[in-house]
Protein backbone atom coordinates (compact mmCIF):
# COMPACT_ATOMS: atom_id res chain seq x y z
CA UNK A 1 0.00 0.00 0.00
CA UNK A 2 1.22 3.49 -0.87
CA UNK A 3 0.54 5.90 2.00
CA UNK A 4 1.00 9.46 0.76
CA UNK A 5 1.33 12.31 3.25
CA UNK A 6 0.66 15.79 1.89
CA UNK A 7 2.15 18.60 3.94
CA UNK A 8 4.72 20.67 2.05
CA UNK A 9 5.35 22.41 -1.28
CA UNK A 10 8.05 21.06 -3.63
CA UNK A 11 9.68 22.26 -6.83
CA UNK A 12 8.29 20.00 -9.59
CA UNK A 13 9.00 19.68 -13.33
CA UNK A 14 5.64 20.90 -14.61
CA UNK A 15 6.48 20.05 -18.21
CA UNK A 16 6.70 16.36 -17.33
CA UNK A 17 3.13 16.28 -16.05
CA UNK A 18 1.74 18.51 -18.76
CA UNK A 19 0.53 21.32 -16.54
CA UNK A 20 2.42 23.92 -18.54
CA UNK A 21 0.10 23.31 -21.47
CA UNK A 22 -3.08 24.35 -19.62
CA UNK A 23 -3.13 27.93 -18.39
CA UNK A 24 -6.20 27.26 -16.24
CA UNK A 25 -4.07 24.94 -14.07
CA UNK A 26 -1.16 27.35 -13.56
CA UNK A 27 -2.49 28.65 -10.24
CA UNK A 28 -3.35 25.14 -9.13
CA UNK A 29 0.15 23.92 -9.84
CA UNK A 30 2.08 26.92 -8.51
CA UNK A 31 2.54 26.73 -4.76
CA UNK A 32 0.48 23.56 -4.31
CA UNK A 33 1.41 20.98 -1.68
CA UNK A 34 2.69 18.01 -3.67
CA UNK A 35 3.72 14.42 -3.04
CA UNK A 36 5.09 11.93 -5.60
CA UNK A 37 5.30 8.18 -5.95
CA UNK A 38 4.74 5.28 -8.32
CA UNK A 39 2.60 2.14 -8.31
CA UNK A 40 5.08 -0.29 -9.86
CA UNK A 41 5.88 -1.89 -6.56
CA UNK A 42 2.26 -2.65 -5.63
CA UNK A 43 1.55 -4.83 -8.70
CA UNK A 44 3.13 -8.04 -9.97
CA UNK A 45 2.09 -8.34 -13.59
CA UNK A 46 3.18 -11.96 -13.85
CA UNK A 47 4.11 -13.74 -17.05
CA UNK A 48 2.08 -11.44 -19.27
CA UNK A 49 3.91 -8.33 -18.18
CA UNK A 50 2.29 -4.93 -18.08
CA UNK A 51 0.05 -3.39 -20.72
CA UNK A 52 2.43 -0.61 -21.68
CA UNK A 53 0.62 2.71 -22.12
CA UNK A 54 -2.53 1.30 -20.47
CA UNK A 55 -0.92 -0.41 -17.45
CA UNK A 56 -2.48 1.99 -14.88
CA UNK A 57 -5.79 3.68 -15.59
CA UNK A 58 -8.73 5.18 -13.78
CA UNK A 59 -11.96 3.22 -13.69
CA UNK A 60 -14.79 4.56 -15.83
CA UNK A 61 -16.79 6.03 -12.94
CA UNK A 62 -13.78 7.33 -11.01
CA UNK A 63 -15.05 10.92 -10.96
CA UNK A 64 -18.42 9.87 -9.52
CA UNK A 65 -16.88 7.61 -6.91
CA UNK A 66 -14.57 10.35 -5.67
CA UNK A 67 -17.37 12.93 -5.68
CA UNK A 68 -19.53 10.55 -3.66
CA UNK A 69 -16.95 10.50 -0.87
CA UNK A 70 -18.43 13.80 0.30
CA UNK A 71 -15.18 15.74 0.72
CA UNK A 72 -15.62 19.44 1.45
CA UNK A 73 -13.48 22.56 1.37
CA UNK A 74 -14.50 25.55 3.49
CA UNK A 75 -17.95 23.97 3.66
CA UNK A 76 -18.31 23.60 -0.12
CA UNK A 77 -18.76 20.12 -1.64
CA UNK A 78 -15.91 18.90 -3.83
CA UNK A 79 -16.80 17.67 -7.34
CA UNK A 80 -14.26 15.61 -9.30
CA UNK A 81 -13.58 15.75 -13.02
CA UNK A 82 -11.06 14.05 -15.32
CA UNK A 83 -8.58 16.03 -17.43
CA UNK A 84 -6.22 14.53 -20.03
CA UNK A 85 -2.97 16.48 -19.71
CA UNK A 86 -0.81 14.41 -22.09
CA UNK A 87 -1.44 11.15 -23.98
CA UNK A 88 -0.24 9.21 -20.94
CA UNK A 89 -1.11 11.51 -18.01
CA UNK A 90 -4.61 11.93 -16.63
CA UNK A 91 -5.53 14.36 -13.81
CA UNK A 92 -8.41 13.55 -11.50
CA UNK A 93 -9.22 17.05 -10.17
CA UNK A 94 -11.51 17.97 -7.26
CA UNK A 95 -13.10 21.44 -7.42
CA UNK A 96 -15.16 23.23 -4.75
CA UNK A 97 -17.25 26.21 -5.85
CA UNK A 98 -14.87 26.90 -8.72
CA UNK A 99 -11.70 26.45 -6.61
CA UNK A 100 -9.30 23.63 -7.52
CA UNK A 101 -8.65 21.84 -4.24
CA UNK A 102 -7.00 18.43 -4.70
CA UNK A 103 -5.97 16.28 -7.63
CA UNK A 104 -4.18 13.07 -8.59
CA UNK A 105 -2.12 13.04 -11.80
CA UNK A 106 -1.39 9.48 -13.01
CA UNK A 107 1.00 8.27 -15.72
CA UNK A 108 -0.82 5.31 -17.27
CA UNK A 109 2.41 3.75 -18.60
CA UNK A 110 4.85 4.05 -15.71
CA UNK A 111 2.47 4.19 -12.76
CA UNK A 112 4.09 7.42 -11.52
CA UNK A 113 1.71 9.79 -9.81
CA UNK A 114 1.61 13.23 -8.23
CA UNK A 115 -0.88 14.25 -5.56
CA UNK A 116 -1.49 18.01 -5.47
CA UNK A 117 -3.42 20.12 -2.99
CA UNK A 118 -4.05 23.81 -3.70
CA UNK A 119 -6.69 24.63 -1.10
CA UNK A 120 -7.92 23.40 2.23
CA UNK A 121 -9.78 20.20 2.93
CA UNK A 122 -12.12 20.35 5.88
CA UNK A 123 -10.87 18.38 8.86
CA UNK A 124 -12.62 17.34 12.04
CA UNK A 125 -13.01 20.54 14.05
CA UNK A 126 -10.73 21.43 16.92
CA UNK A 127 -8.37 18.46 16.77
CA UNK A 128 -5.20 20.40 16.01
CA UNK A 129 -2.76 19.03 13.45
CA UNK A 130 -4.86 15.93 12.71
CA UNK A 131 -5.58 13.84 9.62
CA UNK A 132 -9.31 13.08 10.01
CA UNK A 133 -11.27 14.56 7.09
CA UNK A 134 -14.79 15.80 7.76
CA UNK A 135 -17.35 14.56 5.18
CA UNK A 136 -20.56 16.28 4.15
CA UNK A 137 -22.73 13.60 5.81
CA UNK A 138 -21.09 14.18 9.21
CA UNK A 139 -18.84 11.13 9.09
CA UNK A 140 -15.08 11.19 8.66
CA UNK A 141 -12.29 9.32 6.93
CA UNK A 142 -8.61 9.12 7.81
CA UNK A 143 -7.36 9.09 4.20
CA UNK A 144 -8.55 9.38 0.59
CA UNK A 145 -8.37 5.96 -1.08
CA UNK A 146 -7.36 6.95 -4.60
CA UNK A 147 -6.34 3.37 -5.25
CA UNK A 148 -10.01 2.39 -5.23
CA UNK A 149 -10.52 4.17 -8.58
CA UNK A 150 -7.35 2.82 -10.28
CA UNK A 151 -6.88 -0.53 -12.06
CA UNK A 152 -3.66 -2.20 -13.17
CA UNK A 153 -3.74 -4.07 -16.49
CA UNK A 154 -1.37 -6.80 -17.72
CA UNK A 155 -0.27 -7.59 -21.23
CA UNK A 156 -3.35 -9.65 -22.20
CA UNK A 157 -5.85 -7.22 -20.68
CA UNK A 158 -6.46 -8.76 -17.25
CA UNK A 159 -7.10 -6.10 -14.56
CA UNK A 160 -6.86 -5.78 -10.81
CA UNK A 161 -8.24 -2.94 -8.68
CA UNK A 162 -5.80 -1.16 -6.38
CA UNK A 163 -8.19 -0.31 -3.54
CA UNK A 164 -6.24 0.37 -0.36
CA UNK A 165 -2.94 0.60 -2.28
CA UNK A 166 -2.84 4.37 -2.70
CA UNK A 167 -4.13 6.15 0.40
CA UNK A 168 -3.59 9.91 0.56
CA UNK A 169 -3.42 11.30 4.10
CA UNK A 170 -3.88 15.06 4.40
CA UNK A 171 -2.38 16.58 7.54
CA UNK A 172 -4.43 19.48 8.86
CA UNK A 173 -2.83 22.90 8.87
CA UNK A 174 -3.01 24.83 12.15
CA UNK A 175 -2.40 28.51 12.86
CA UNK A 176 1.07 29.79 13.75
CA UNK A 177 0.41 33.15 15.43
CA UNK A 178 3.20 35.60 16.19
CA UNK A 179 3.11 38.57 18.56
CA UNK A 180 5.70 41.24 19.25
CA UNK A 181 6.20 44.56 21.05
CA UNK A 182 5.49 47.78 19.20
CA UNK A 183 5.91 50.31 22.04
CA UNK A 184 5.25 50.94 25.73
CA UNK A 185 2.44 52.99 27.23
CA UNK A 186 3.19 55.69 29.80
CA UNK A 187 0.45 57.42 31.77
CA UNK A 188 1.76 60.68 33.23
CA UNK A 189 0.63 62.13 36.55
CA UNK A 190 1.57 65.51 35.13
CA UNK A 191 -1.84 66.24 33.73
CA UNK A 192 -2.25 67.46 30.19
CA UNK A 193 -0.49 66.59 26.96
CA UNK A 194 2.38 64.58 28.45
CA UNK A 195 3.72 61.10 27.55
CA UNK A 196 0.77 59.05 26.20
CA UNK A 197 -1.97 61.00 27.99
CA UNK A 198 -5.14 61.64 26.01
CA UNK A 199 -8.13 63.88 26.72
CA UNK A 200 -10.91 62.44 28.88
CA UNK A 201 -13.32 62.10 25.99
CA UNK A 202 -16.36 59.86 25.76
CA UNK A 203 -14.83 56.90 23.96
CA UNK A 204 -11.99 56.21 26.38
CA UNK A 205 -14.13 57.06 29.40
CA UNK A 206 -16.70 54.54 28.21
CA UNK A 207 -14.08 51.78 28.28
CA UNK A 208 -13.83 52.11 32.05
CA UNK A 209 -17.41 53.02 32.93
CA UNK A 210 -18.01 49.61 34.54
CA UNK A 211 -15.01 49.79 36.89
CA UNK A 212 -16.54 49.65 40.35
CA UNK A 213 -15.46 51.77 43.34
CA UNK A 214 -13.32 54.17 41.41
CA UNK A 215 -10.84 55.87 43.71
CA UNK A 216 -10.10 59.58 43.90
CA UNK A 217 -7.19 61.76 44.88
CA UNK A 218 -7.39 65.35 46.18
CA UNK A 219 -4.11 66.12 44.41
CA UNK A 220 -5.51 65.10 41.01
CA UNK A 221 -8.14 67.14 39.22
CA UNK A 222 -9.77 63.90 38.09
CA UNK A 223 -8.98 60.60 36.34
CA UNK A 224 -6.00 60.66 33.93
CA UNK A 225 -6.29 58.68 30.67
CA UNK A 226 -3.63 57.35 28.27
CA UNK A 227 -3.54 55.21 25.11
CA UNK A 228 -0.84 53.84 22.81
CA UNK A 229 -0.04 51.07 20.31
CA UNK A 230 1.75 48.49 22.45
CA UNK A 231 1.51 45.15 20.59
CA UNK A 232 1.56 43.99 16.97
CA UNK A 233 0.78 40.49 15.77
CA UNK A 234 0.19 38.27 12.76
CA UNK A 235 -2.45 35.57 12.94
CA UNK A 236 -0.91 33.23 10.30
CA UNK A 237 -4.15 31.28 10.11
CA UNK A 238 -2.79 28.91 7.48
CA UNK A 239 -4.69 26.97 4.84
CA UNK A 240 -7.91 26.82 6.83
CA UNK A 241 -8.57 30.53 6.28
CA UNK A 242 -10.80 33.12 7.91
CA UNK A 243 -9.48 32.56 11.37
CA UNK A 244 -10.54 34.54 14.41
CA UNK A 245 -8.32 35.81 17.19
CA UNK A 246 -8.55 36.85 20.81
CA UNK A 247 -6.07 39.01 22.70
CA UNK A 248 -6.30 38.89 26.50
CA UNK A 249 -4.39 39.78 29.66
CA UNK A 250 -3.15 37.28 32.22
CA UNK A 251 -2.06 38.35 35.71
CA UNK A 252 1.10 36.50 36.72
CA UNK A 253 1.40 38.06 40.18
CA UNK A 254 -1.43 39.82 42.01
CA UNK A 255 0.95 41.82 44.23
CA UNK A 256 1.74 44.71 41.90
CA UNK A 257 4.71 46.01 43.88
CA UNK A 258 3.20 49.50 43.61
CA UNK A 259 1.69 51.68 46.33
CA UNK A 260 -0.26 54.90 46.34
CA UNK A 261 1.47 58.09 47.44
CA UNK A 262 -0.17 57.53 50.84
CA UNK A 263 1.53 54.11 51.08
CA UNK A 264 -1.45 51.84 50.34
CA UNK A 265 -0.42 48.62 48.57
CA UNK A 266 -2.05 47.97 45.19
CA UNK A 267 -3.29 44.50 44.26
CA UNK A 268 -4.06 43.45 40.67
CA UNK A 269 -7.36 41.80 39.72
CA UNK A 270 -8.78 40.73 36.35
CA UNK A 271 -12.27 42.15 35.91
CA UNK A 272 -14.16 41.66 32.63
CA UNK A 273 -10.85 41.30 30.83
CA UNK A 274 -9.42 44.50 32.30
CA UNK A 275 -6.63 44.71 34.85
CA UNK A 276 -7.73 46.77 37.86
CA UNK A 277 -5.33 47.83 40.61
CA UNK A 278 -7.10 48.13 43.96
CA UNK A 279 -6.04 49.39 47.40
CA UNK A 280 -7.05 47.52 50.62
CA UNK A 281 -10.28 49.52 50.93
CA UNK A 282 -11.37 48.12 47.56
CA UNK A 283 -11.08 51.40 45.67
CA UNK A 284 -9.56 51.29 42.20
CA UNK A 285 -6.25 53.12 41.83
CA UNK A 286 -6.02 52.41 38.08
CA UNK A 287 -7.41 50.20 35.32
CA UNK A 288 -5.91 48.88 32.05
CA UNK A 289 -7.75 47.76 28.89
CA UNK A 290 -6.25 45.62 26.09
CA UNK A 291 -7.80 46.26 22.67
CA UNK A 292 -8.07 43.48 20.07
CA UNK A 293 -5.83 45.45 17.71
CA UNK A 294 -2.96 45.54 20.21
CA UNK A 295 -3.58 49.03 21.59
CA UNK A 296 -3.68 49.57 25.35
CA UNK A 297 -5.74 52.16 27.22
CA UNK A 298 -5.18 53.16 30.86
CA UNK A 299 -6.91 55.26 33.49
CA UNK A 300 -5.41 56.42 36.80
CA UNK A 301 -7.61 57.48 39.71
CA UNK A 302 -5.05 57.80 42.53
CA UNK A 303 -1.46 59.04 42.58
CA UNK A 304 1.25 56.37 42.79
CA UNK A 305 4.40 56.39 44.87
CA UNK A 306 7.66 56.95 42.94
CA UNK A 307 10.55 56.21 45.32
CA UNK A 308 13.35 57.96 43.42
CA UNK A 309 13.49 61.41 45.03
CA UNK A 310 16.34 62.46 42.73
CA UNK A 311 13.98 62.52 39.77
CA UNK A 312 10.58 64.08 39.28
CA UNK A 313 10.08 62.29 35.96
CA UNK A 314 10.78 58.65 36.83
CA UNK A 315 8.38 55.84 36.00
CA UNK A 316 7.31 52.64 37.70
CA UNK A 317 5.75 49.65 35.94
CA UNK A 318 4.09 46.25 36.35
CA UNK A 319 7.25 44.46 35.27
CA UNK A 320 6.90 40.68 35.70
CA UNK A 321 3.24 40.94 36.69
CA UNK A 322 1.30 40.78 33.40
CA UNK A 323 1.30 38.70 30.19
CA UNK A 324 -0.66 39.17 26.95
CA UNK A 325 -1.95 36.01 25.22
CA UNK A 326 -2.88 35.81 21.53
CA UNK A 327 -5.10 32.87 20.53
CA UNK A 328 -5.89 32.22 16.86
CA UNK A 329 -8.62 29.78 15.78
CA UNK A 330 -8.88 28.63 12.16
CA UNK A 331 -11.88 27.53 10.10
CA UNK A 332 -11.51 23.96 11.38
CA UNK A 333 -11.68 25.11 14.99
CA UNK A 334 -7.98 24.51 15.63
CA UNK A 335 -6.81 26.97 18.29
CA UNK A 336 -3.17 27.91 18.88
CA UNK A 337 -1.93 30.42 21.46
CA UNK A 338 1.25 32.41 21.94
CA UNK A 339 2.12 34.88 24.68
CA UNK A 340 4.42 37.75 25.56
CA UNK A 341 5.30 39.51 28.83
CA UNK A 342 3.98 43.07 28.87
CA UNK A 343 4.19 44.22 32.49
CA UNK A 344 7.29 46.33 31.85
CA UNK A 345 5.41 48.11 29.05
CA UNK A 346 2.64 49.33 31.39
CA UNK A 347 4.22 52.34 33.09
CA UNK A 348 3.24 55.20 35.39
CA UNK A 349 5.18 58.46 35.12
CA UNK A 350 5.95 60.66 38.13
CA UNK A 351 4.78 64.20 38.72
CA UNK A 352 7.08 66.57 40.62
CA UNK A 353 6.77 70.06 42.11
CA UNK A 354 7.00 72.91 39.63
CA UNK A 355 6.96 76.70 39.72
CA UNK A 356 3.66 78.32 38.72
CA UNK A 357 3.18 81.65 36.95
CA UNK A 358 1.98 83.33 40.17
CA UNK A 359 4.25 85.64 42.23
CA UNK A 360 4.25 86.61 45.92
CA UNK A 361 6.25 89.83 46.73
CA UNK A 362 6.35 91.45 50.20
CA UNK A 363 8.08 94.47 51.75
CA UNK A 364 9.60 94.56 55.24
CA UNK A 365 10.28 97.90 56.98
CA UNK A 366 13.14 98.26 59.42
CA UNK A 367 11.14 101.06 61.15
CA UNK A 368 9.05 98.29 62.68
CA UNK A 369 11.90 96.46 64.40
CA UNK A 370 11.49 96.10 68.19
CA UNK A 371 14.01 93.64 69.57
CA UNK A 372 16.66 93.79 72.32
CA UNK A 373 19.08 94.44 69.51
CA UNK A 374 17.31 97.29 67.81
CA UNK A 375 14.23 99.56 67.97
CA UNK A 376 12.80 101.17 64.87
CA UNK A 377 11.38 104.68 64.63
CA UNK A 378 7.88 103.60 63.70
CA UNK A 379 6.18 100.90 65.74
CA UNK A 380 2.87 99.13 65.41
CA UNK A 381 1.28 98.95 68.87
CA UNK A 382 -2.23 97.61 69.36
CA UNK A 383 -3.02 98.24 65.72
CA UNK A 384 -1.72 101.85 65.91
CA UNK A 385 1.35 103.22 64.22
CA UNK A 386 3.41 105.30 66.69
CA UNK A 387 5.97 107.64 65.15
CA UNK A 388 8.54 109.79 67.03
CA UNK A 389 9.04 113.23 65.61
CA UNK A 390 11.65 115.76 66.58
CA UNK A 391 13.55 113.31 68.80
CA UNK A 392 17.08 112.14 68.19
CA UNK A 393 16.71 109.19 70.52
CA UNK A 394 13.91 106.84 71.45
CA UNK A 395 13.49 107.05 75.27
CA UNK A 396 9.91 108.23 75.01
CA UNK A 397 9.08 105.37 72.63
CA UNK A 398 10.70 102.88 74.99
CA UNK A 399 8.65 104.33 77.85
CA UNK A 400 5.47 103.88 75.85
CA UNK A 401 6.41 100.26 75.08
CA UNK A 402 7.04 99.51 78.73
CA UNK A 403 3.76 101.06 79.81
CA UNK A 404 1.87 99.34 77.03
CA UNK A 405 3.21 95.94 77.91
CA UNK A 406 2.44 96.39 81.60
CA UNK A 407 -0.98 97.93 81.12
CA UNK A 408 -2.00 95.95 78.07
CA UNK A 409 -5.58 95.84 79.22
CA UNK A 410 -5.93 99.62 78.96
CA UNK A 411 -6.88 101.39 75.84
CA UNK A 412 -3.85 102.83 74.09
CA UNK A 413 -5.64 106.06 73.41
CA UNK A 414 -6.04 106.65 77.15
CA UNK A 415 -2.30 106.23 77.61
CA UNK A 416 -1.47 108.57 74.80
CA UNK A 417 -3.54 111.34 76.37
CA UNK A 418 -0.85 111.56 79.08
CA UNK A 419 1.96 111.66 76.58
CA UNK A 420 3.27 115.23 76.12
CA UNK A 421 3.95 116.46 72.63
CA UNK A 422 6.38 116.05 70.79
CA UNK A 423 4.71 112.60 70.23
CA UNK A 424 2.31 112.37 67.40
CA UNK A 425 -0.04 109.41 67.40
CA UNK A 426 -1.09 108.31 64.03
CA UNK A 427 -3.87 105.81 63.56
CA UNK A 428 -4.70 104.20 60.27
CA UNK A 429 -1.84 106.13 58.66
CA UNK A 430 -3.65 109.45 59.25
Image (spheres, helix red, strand yellow):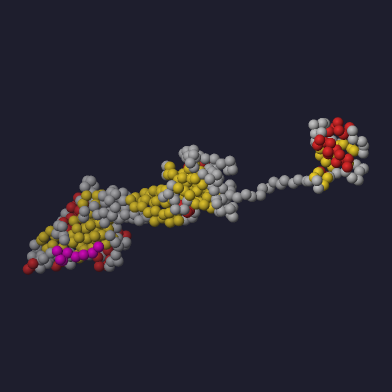
Question: In the current view of this chain or complex, which residue is farthest to the front?
Answer: 406
Q: Residue at x 23, y 57 (%)?
A: 169
Q: Position of residue 323 (x, y in %)?
A: 42, 51
Q: Is residue 40 magenta?
A: yes
Assign the N terminus to one quadrant of the image. bottom left
Q: Position of residue 425 (x, y in %)?
A: 87, 36
Frontmost residue, 293 versus 19: 293
Foreground residue, 160 or 207? Answer: 207
User: At 43% across and 54% down in the image, what residue appears?
Assistant: 341
Depth check: give the residue in front, 357 or 89.
Answer: 357
Image quarter (top left, top right, bottom left or bottom right) of the C terminus:
top right
Q: Is residue 88 visible?
A: no
Res 248 visible:
yes
Q: Position of residue 363 (x, y in %)?
A: 78, 46
Q: Is residue 308 left or right of residue 174?
A: right
> Which residues make up the magenta segment?
35-42
Q: Residue at x 9, y 63 (%)?
A: 157
Residue 196 at x, y percent in the picture: 54, 50
Amino acid sequence: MKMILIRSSLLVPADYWGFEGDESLTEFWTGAAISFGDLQGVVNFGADGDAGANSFTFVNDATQQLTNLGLTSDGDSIQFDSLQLTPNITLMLGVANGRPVIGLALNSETGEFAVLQADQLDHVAGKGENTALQLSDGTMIDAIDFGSVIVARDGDGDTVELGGKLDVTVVDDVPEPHIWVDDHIRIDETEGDHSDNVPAKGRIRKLFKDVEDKGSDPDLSGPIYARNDVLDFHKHVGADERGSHELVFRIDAAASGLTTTEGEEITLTLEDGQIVGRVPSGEAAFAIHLHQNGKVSMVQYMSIEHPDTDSSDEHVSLDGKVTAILTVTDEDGDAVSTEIAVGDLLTFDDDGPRVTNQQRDVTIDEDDIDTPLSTGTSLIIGGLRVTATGLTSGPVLRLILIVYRVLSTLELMEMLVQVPSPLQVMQNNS
